[in-house]
Image (cartoon, rainbow, N blue to C red):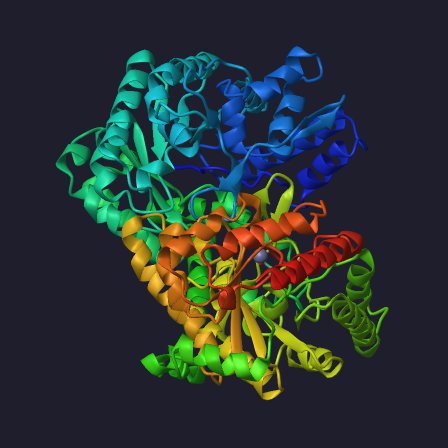
């Protein structure tokens, strides 16, 4: 039995790579200094894995920005606009690389960055490869080979990791019409083979080709491409062993493709899809082959301790059918998605020992892999049997702990009925009542919630944390900010005001800190893209809301104005999506618990006289399962969770929601089913094209398509916004149209915000005069 790992976090346990990269981009350190940091991280990672007892340690899993971009460079998939940099003598390999990742503004050249999108259903973002009709491939960067040799020099024969050829093509985008990217396979393969041969000649024994596309819906053409790709690769190599790694979902019907590939080992994610172990063990052509099976049994996507008794049962089951020397054990996927090291969490006030002992981060997960190997081989040294006992005690305490299990919360979720997610009356009735009660003008104006989080505001929070400011002093200063923003909003003539969200560090963390069932870490960082890392809060137990979370701020704000003040909440799905979640109950149950907590807050806001309440759900779309067949089920409970949080209010209380991602088409029916009185959405970057989905569907409720892009410092002219509004008005009934920016303004400067919103009001006035 072999232990292996699919990939290790590359940001460094203290986010060393983030710091070094950002300093390098700012011109504060040299490229050599950046390389030194990178080398240290790679060496440290290899060493950590070696010490943990991992037999096959990955290389080329390190990346300066993104491993898909690394692959593009290794295969020479570099769009012409970046190639020119090199031709003009401005760029070496790393400059070209960073130009593709982040754009390039120097030497009177301005090139924007390449598109970035989510890596399957994770919160990691990759740089999307661009393909043209006459795309050629050729070796450019030598990274995989250099990394292999670097480890070899340290005496470690690693298993280089590459994104597999089919997944690489599928992850990209056709930049021209008239071809399908999968048809490029034939031209692409020789370059892959060249890289693999090179690795082989340098002494590599194993290589891991990541093909997570095998867990997604594939066309017949794509399934055939897999067969062709690996046939060609096999025929070209002499001894290099190939492992194909799948993860994040079941291989499902693709299991026949996956098990028929002429490869040496297949990795399956048994955390996301435990049932595929039984499936594969029943396939005679796999069982009777000599192929190895890699059991992905340690959760690479979450922070919970593995249950050894369950994992040992998996291993036992596999080894009853396949001989032990055909088994590998590993985490379910690359540990890129786990925080680095639980040992760094030393502050017991932040993470109490009782909860900490239920967890494992990347480094601890490696120990779990190694311990499982020892245990399954019956190597019961005192050390290992102690580890087993400790593990089982932790698992048992988690199933029973009163910190986690609150009967009254569970009871409340179990008592949910259909009526709980039903407003008293349908939208038309509510709209008429709200029109009368809220007395809003035609084309009401509003913003999405946050105003600039200036350095001053952030400093206030830092001072509060350090104890330099008392709670009362802090609140006082925040109130001043709120008042200022209210006066200013009144002055420029906005209709529905916001308090500005100055008191919030982050739209999920802020609520997590006030809900029970949540804990936080000090160093639990995970790479999101490039040098950007996130530190997701952790839901460990039943969630409830001990006391009101936002009522104080919203009522204060409302008391300072006669205009309507909008209450601001984050919705249950977004809170769920941006946290590490429990693995001991379905996501749906956790979502419903959060929904009830948010509902409590909504009702308290209403009681406090807040008549307009916004529940943000920007993350509904990213929760979509990888397989289409699973969408309906997810969307059903996701929509129900939102409705649960929003439905108990009076008809005259106006519920808003906000979403900011492109592509509403395929989920528009569900967005409509959320039945928010008003939805504000991102549309301005697409010149209102994203609104088409709503128009086609004849979306019945009120809608505020963003009239300007808040992601850019640019201040649009009022006529520009007027044109967008007129465009929207062609299809949207005037009584349903709101005027607002694309998203919250927290990342903008005040000067830009003021100028842009003033122009937005001018545009609205012109529109009102014209109808
Ligand atoms: N209310 C939040 C804000 O204005 C919404 C942020 C978001 O959509 N991501 O910042
Ligand atoms: Zn938004």
State the image coordinates of residue 30 (x, y, percent, origin top left): 78, 26
Compared to residue 351, the image places residue 473 above or below, namely: below
- Which quadrant holds residue 488? bottom right
Q: Depth check: 571 or 564 in front?
A: 564
For the point 46% across and 65% down, the residue is 394
Q: Is residue 358 visible?
A: no
For the point 44% across and 31% down, the residue is 172
- Which quadrant holds residue 446? bottom right
Quadrant occupied by the N terminus: top left
Looking at the rendered structure, the number of numbered marks drawn on it comes to 0
Q: Depth check: 530 or 386 in front?
A: 530
For the point 64% across and 60% down, the residue is 764
Q: Depth check: 165 or 20 in front?
A: 165
702 left or right of 30 in image: left
State the residue lying farthest toward the right.
468
Quadrant of the picture in which ligand 2 is shown:
bottom right
- Which quadrant holds residue 83? top right
Q: Is residue 460 visible?
A: yes
State the image coordinates of residue 597 (x, y, percent, origin top left): 51, 77
State the image coordinates of residue 176 (x, y, percent, origin top left): 43, 25
State the image coordinates of residue 284 (x, y, percent, origin top left): 13, 36
Compared to residue 672, the image places residue 415 above or below, namely: below
């Amino acid at each position: 039995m072999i232990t292996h790992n699919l990939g290790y976090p590359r940001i460094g346990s203290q986010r060393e790579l983030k710091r070094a990269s950002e300093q390098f981009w700012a011109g504060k350190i040299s490229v050599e200094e950046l390389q030194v940091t990178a080398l240290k991280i790679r060496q440290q990672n290899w060493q950590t894995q070696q010490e943990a007892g991992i037999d096959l340690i990955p290389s080329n899993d390190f990346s300066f920005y993104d491993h898909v971009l690394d692959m593009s460079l290794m295969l020479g998939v570099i769009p012409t606009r970046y190639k020119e940099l090199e031709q003009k003598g401005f760029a070496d390999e790393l400059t070209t690389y960073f130009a593709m990742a982040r754009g390039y503004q120097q030497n009177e050249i301005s090139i924007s960055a390449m598109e970035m999108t989510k890596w399957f259903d994770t919160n990691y973002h990759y740089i999307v490869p661009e393909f043209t009709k006459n795309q050629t491939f050729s070796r450019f960067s030598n990274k995989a080979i250099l990394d292999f040799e670097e480890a070899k020099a340290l005496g470690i024969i690693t298993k280089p990791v590459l994104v597999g050829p089919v997944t690489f093509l599928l992850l990209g985008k056709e930049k021209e019409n008239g071809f399908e990217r999968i048809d490029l396979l034939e031209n692409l393969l020789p370059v892959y083979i060249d890289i693999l041969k090179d690795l082989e000649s340098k002494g590599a024994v194993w290589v891991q080709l990541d093909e997570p596309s095998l867990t997604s819906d594939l066309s017949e053409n794509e399934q055939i491409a897999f067969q062709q790709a690996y046939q060609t690769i096999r025929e070209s190599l002499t001894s290099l062993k190939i492992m194909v790694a799948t993860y994040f979902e079941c291989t499902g019907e693709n299991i026949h493709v996956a098990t028929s590939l002429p490869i040496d080992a297949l990795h399956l994610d048994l955390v996301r899809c435990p049932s595929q172990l039984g499936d594969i063990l029943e396939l005679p052509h796999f069982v009777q082959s000599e192929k190895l099976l890699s059991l992905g049994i340690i959760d690479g996507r979450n922070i919970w301790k593995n249950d050894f008794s369950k994992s040992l049962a998996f291993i036992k089951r596999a080894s009853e059918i396949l001989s032990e020397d055909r088994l590998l054990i590993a985490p379910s996927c690359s540990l890129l998605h786990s925080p680095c090291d639980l040992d760094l969490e030393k502050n017991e006030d932040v993470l109490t020992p009782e909860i900490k002992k239920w967890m494992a981060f990347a480094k601890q997960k490696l120990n779990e892999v190694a311990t499982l190997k020892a245990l399954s081989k019956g190597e019961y040294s005192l050390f290992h049997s102690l580890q087993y006992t400790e593990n089982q005690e932790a698992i048992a305490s988690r199933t029973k702990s009163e910190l986690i299990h609150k009967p009254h919360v569970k009871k409340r979720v179990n008592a949910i009925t259909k009526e709980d997610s039903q407003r008293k009356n349908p939208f038309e009735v509510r709209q008429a009542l709200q029109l009368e009660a809220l007395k809003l003008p035609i084309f009401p104006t509003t913003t999405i919630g946050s105003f600039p989080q200036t350095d001053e505001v952030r400093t206030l929070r830092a001072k509060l944390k350090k104890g330099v400011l008392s709670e009362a002093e802090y609140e006082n200063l925040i109130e001043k900010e709120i008042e200022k923003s209210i006066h200013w909003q009144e002055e420029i003539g906005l209709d529905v005001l916001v308090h500005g969200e100055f008191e919030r560090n982050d739209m999920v963390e802020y609520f997590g800190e006030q809900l029970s069932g949540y804990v936080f870490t000090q160093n639990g960082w995970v790479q999101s893209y490039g040098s950007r890392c996130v530190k997701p809060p952790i839901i460990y137990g039943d969630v409830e809301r001990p006391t009101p979370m936002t009522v104080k701020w919203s009522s204060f704000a409302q008391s300072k104005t006669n205009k309507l003040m909008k209450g601001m909440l984050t919705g249950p799905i977004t809170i769920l999506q941006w946290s590490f979640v429990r693995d001991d109950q379905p996501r749906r149950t956790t979502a419903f618990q959060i929904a009830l907590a948010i509902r409590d807050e909504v009702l308290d806001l209403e009681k406090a006289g807040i008549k307009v309440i916004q529940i943000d759900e920007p993350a509904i779309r990213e929760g979509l399962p990888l397989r289409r067949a699973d969408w309906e089920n997810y969307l059903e409970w996701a929509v129900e969770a939102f409705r649960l949080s929003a439905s108990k209010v009076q008809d005259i209380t106006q519920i808003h929601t906000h979403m900011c991602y492109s592509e509403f088409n395929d989920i528009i029916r569900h967005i409509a089913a959320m039945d928010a009185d008003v939805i504000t959405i991102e549309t301005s970057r697409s010149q209102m094209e994203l609104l088409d989905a709503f128009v086609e569907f004849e979306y019945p409720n009120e809608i505020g398509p963003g009239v300007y892009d808040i992601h850019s410092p640019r201040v649009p002219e009022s006529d520009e916004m007027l044109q967008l509004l007129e465009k929207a008005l062609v299809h949207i009934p005037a009584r349903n149209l709101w005027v607002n920016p694309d998203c919250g303004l927290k990342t903008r400067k005040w000067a830009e915000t003021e100028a842009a919103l003033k122009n937005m009001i001018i545009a609205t006035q012109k529109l009102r005069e014209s109808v």
